[in-house]
Image (cartoon, rainbow, N blue to C red):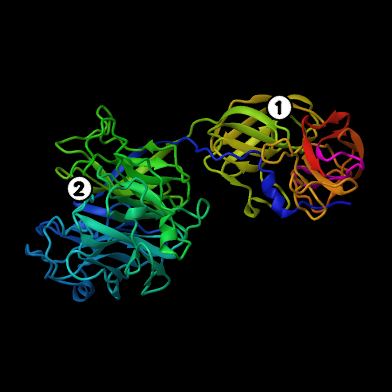
Amino acid sequence: MSRLIPTQLIGAFCFLASSAAAQISVHPGAITQLATNAQHPAWCKANCGPNPIVYQQIVPGSGGVYQIWSMNATGGNQTCLSCTPYAQANLPGATCGPFGNTRCQQGNPEWAPNGDIVFQQERSGCVLTSEEATPGTGLCADLVECDRNFTTSCTTIAVSGTGSASGFLQYRFSADGTKLFGGHVTAQSGDCTAIFGEALAIRIFNWSSQPAATQIVYTGTATLNGDLLPAAYMPGNTCPSAFVEGATTYPTSVEPSTRTLFFSLTGDTTQAFRQYSLDISSGVASTILSTLTVVSPGGVEWSEMGKINPQGTYYAFVSSTCTPDLPPVTIANVALDLAIENPGGGSKACATTYNTPGSSMYYFHGSDVQFEYLDWGPADGVHNNQIVANVSDDLTFNNIYLYNLVFSQPAPALSSVLNGGSFTPVFASGEWVTIFGENLAPDSRQWAVSDFLGNQLPTSLDGVSVSIDGIPAYVGYISPSQINVLAPDDPASGMVNVQVTSGSVSSQSVLVNKQEFVPAFFMANGSKYIVATHGDNTLIGSANPAQPGEEIVLWGTGFGATNPPAPSGQLIIAPVNLANTVTVTVGGVAALVDFAGLVAPGLDQINVVVPAGLPAGDQLVVASVGEVQTQANAYFTVQ
């Protein structure tokens, strides 16, 4: 009798799946100046008009007042949005600050999922210095949402409080567009915080439709007016307060996008920014804050402004550690370049070298360069791998540039090719094969329903393919350091070539032994115990042993052809008997084999009756087909 593999066992056949990060090599190709005296560009990804880039622009002669502008992707058609008659009539006017500023500050614009623009708007009547009034401080700032042209709708969606020592800063949308989050200024305490003495909380909004922001109100420990107070929960923080700004959320392929938010926070005496992750799936504030995890090295690193690209393949942020000789890290003296890493973290590469003496990009005219606010272009086939960012040295330039990033991929390097069950260097057609090495794939994932063409198994995942004896193998799992493939049908025996191709780069071929029969049991978590199940599909183990006389199922791979033949590159619709007789011994005693067949790609099911009279304990199990035995030292437990 056959028994299809239970879904809860799929995780058992993970073949020692690895999650090491791929190496990244990146440099800017063409660099184009788009706007001068401008900051904080944001690039529209959907519901875009002719001007997909929105940014903040200094009003000439204003002493540093910013307004909201937009432009096209080449820097043309630059348009002042907050100068429209509708905006002038519906946004605060000329009463901001004591220095005769002609307009209130507007800044830090972000595109909303519905195509509107959300930005910080300074309240009238606040008493601030010219430095404090800049959008980068968030002081005395509320959140406003306007239509993309600022001609039909401008609505204040959230008020930060009253007085100068309150405001919102650096709000971002989650990857799925359901959350809006960032920093909320609650005080100007001066207690060893990084910028202007601000103590910030985390405020998170639900986002649905216009007007769109509804605050998520948290209560209990570590909350204030519904906000989260992270200072006491930040690993390594030595201050009673924290500076917080919104960063990004990782896509669902890495973390559930409505659960894990990534922020830049600081509060320790090094005055350095660190990036943190935060799981907001719980409704309990203290539980949420207990998940705060550092995702950048910290210490003296200044690491912020992180954003994931729309494809979910690269995470971009600014970092001070790209500078060979790191200056003291303070708000007034920090050298920042563009860094790129894998979405899962690690393998950081510096894409710009403005602060590296001797490099072709090096620029120093009395002050270090700061690569600041950035955003990725849309994944539309035209602007893939493009970043728009503002870069300045606070002395000679403060401009927005377009960077065409060029990613160069190192060739895959194979260290071993092994049987996916026994991890020995020999395999058969239709058997799972595990490949270890470096730079094997750009990301980590298993095959998904969308990868199949009808009943045909995929021969490539995310541009990663494998050939065995010149024939495409079927790719079930990829990662930078491990690939699992199903060996294709091939009558050849002996040493065959195995080669991995990732993108446009191929590895050197490796010779591996291939035979007609290479039976192997799958092993449980790298132990000496095979993957075996009871009749109710529960795993056999020391706490749930097999009984003498019980019919159990042994799971393996490489037991040879089926009758009728089942092509290795297709899904198995119904179990198919193996073409050759399989024998099994348990504890040296022959066991009755009730069924031996292929039930899923590369997955053989062997139903056996545990021999009577076996003593309790671990029993050696050996299966044979075509006079070839399964691996040595494979056991299951008998009661």
Position of 602 compared to 452: left or right?
right
Residue type at numbered disc 1 = Pro
**Which image quadrant for residue 444?**
top right
Q: What element carries label 2?
A: strand
Q: Name the residue under label 1.
A: 425
The quarter of the picture where the C terminus appears is: top right
Q: Of label 2 and label 1, which has the lower sequence position?
A: 2
Picture coordinates of residue 293 (x, y %)? 42, 49
In the image, residue 439 above or below residue 495: below
Q: Is mark 1 on a helix, strand or loop?
A: loop
Bounds of the magenta segment: 596-618
Please name the residue shown 73% across and 33% down the image. Answer: 422
**Which image quadrant for residue 125?**
bottom left
In the image, residue 587 above or below residue 547: above
Q: Do the residues labelled 2 and 1 touch (CB within 8 Å)?
A: no
Picture coordinates of residue 408 (x, y %)? 45, 34
Q: How far is mark 2 from mark 1, CA to CA? A: 58 Å
Please name the residue shown 84% across and 50% down the image. Answer: 575
Which numbered disc covers residue 398?
2
Q: Is the magenta stretch mostly helix, strand or loop?
A: strand
